[in-house]
Image: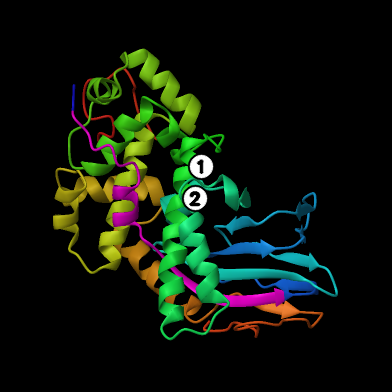
Amino acid sequence: MIESCSDRLQALLTHFPVSTRMFHAGSLCGVTDLLAPGEGGHMHLVRSGPVGVVRPGHPPLTVNVPSLLLYPRPVPRQFVCGTELGAHLVCARLDFEGGAANPVARALPDEICVPLASIDGAADVLSLLFTEAFGDNCGRHALIDRLFGVVLIQVLRHLMETQGLEGGMLAGLSHPKLRRALVALHERPEQEWSLDALAAAAGMSRTAFANAFRDTLGCTPGGYLQGWRIRLAQQALMRGRQLKAIAVDVGYGSEAALSRAFKAQCGLSPREWRQQESARRDGAGGKEGGWLPTAHCQRGADAGVGADTDTNTDTDSDADVDRD
């Protein structure tokens, strides 16, 4: 059996990191509209409430206990708080490298609400974060930004350990057997992965593995492998690497083979995609979400606006499941 790394998040966060930056710490009263950021998402830590969350087309959510609210993608919403005491929150912007294509962002639902007390091992981190956010220590902004990154990893762990996701990559990483194959694939995309090899990594028969993979992740192993390789290739392209070197690193035998797979996955050649992505990023530069408060009761530190603010895969083949 193939030995694989047991760390389910290491390859994801190495290849597709997430940066965090606090943009609000203080109280909110009344109704507050949130502008969705041009890229990325938001994390809100509700220290005290209650807080009502209203999203167009969705049932309202009421947060009555200290909780984490996570929005991995731009989602317009309103926070509705009491008009006297209000609610106390610390909020951060999440910048997922790769934007909407970031596999962590793609694997998360539009809205996540988790009571803080249920996140195993987070109590000390959260206590320090709140102390810094509502205090006035020097260097606190840099410290809080890093603590939000720690909390993000802890909530991802929580979602995997509690199997709090119904499908997709993180649900696969929650599966007691599939996760071994996924980690191996994430760590070694350049390997010529056959269905037999992936099933062996998972400790399953080929048929059981293929069926469980499709049922849990919604695609075939070959389709997933191709998507992972192409996302890695996209990251490397945006970092200025040459296509020939990228092809070797992500498991394609030649530049031409990578180009064909790339176009099949994205509808564009690598060169066309890089030009389009560069233009998109230039156009999105500087766009950030923030608050549009309609009631003013923002007391506490930094209470102002924006403060510091499945593709052609035969699962019976013994060849590379993402073959050209």
Quick check: is 21 in the magenta stretch?
Answer: yes
Model colouring: rainbow
Q: Residue at x 32, y 38 (%)?
A: 225
Q: Residue at x 30, y 49 (%)?
A: 10
Left or right position of 230 against 153: left
Left or right position of 295 against 114: right
Q: Secondary structure at mark 1?
A: helix
Q: Quadrant of the C terminus?
A: top left
Residue 272 at least partly seen: yes
30 to 256, vertically: above or below: below
Marker count (numbered) = 2
38 to 190, vertically: above or below: below
Give the numbered dot on residue 159.
1
Q: Which residue is mark 2?
A: 155
At label 1, the amino acid type is Leu
248 to 320, vertically: above or below: below
Q: Which residues are magenta?
A: 3-27
Q: Residue at x 35, y 47 (%)?
A: 9
Q: Residues within 10 Å of mark 1 (few under 14, many from 20)?
A: some
Contact between labelled residues 2 and 1, with CB atoms less than 8 Å apart? yes
Q: Which quadrant holds residue 41?
A: bottom right
At label 2, the amino acid type is Val
Q: Residues within 10 Å of mark 2 (few under 14, many from 20)?
A: many
Q: Which quadrant holds residue 290?
A: bottom right
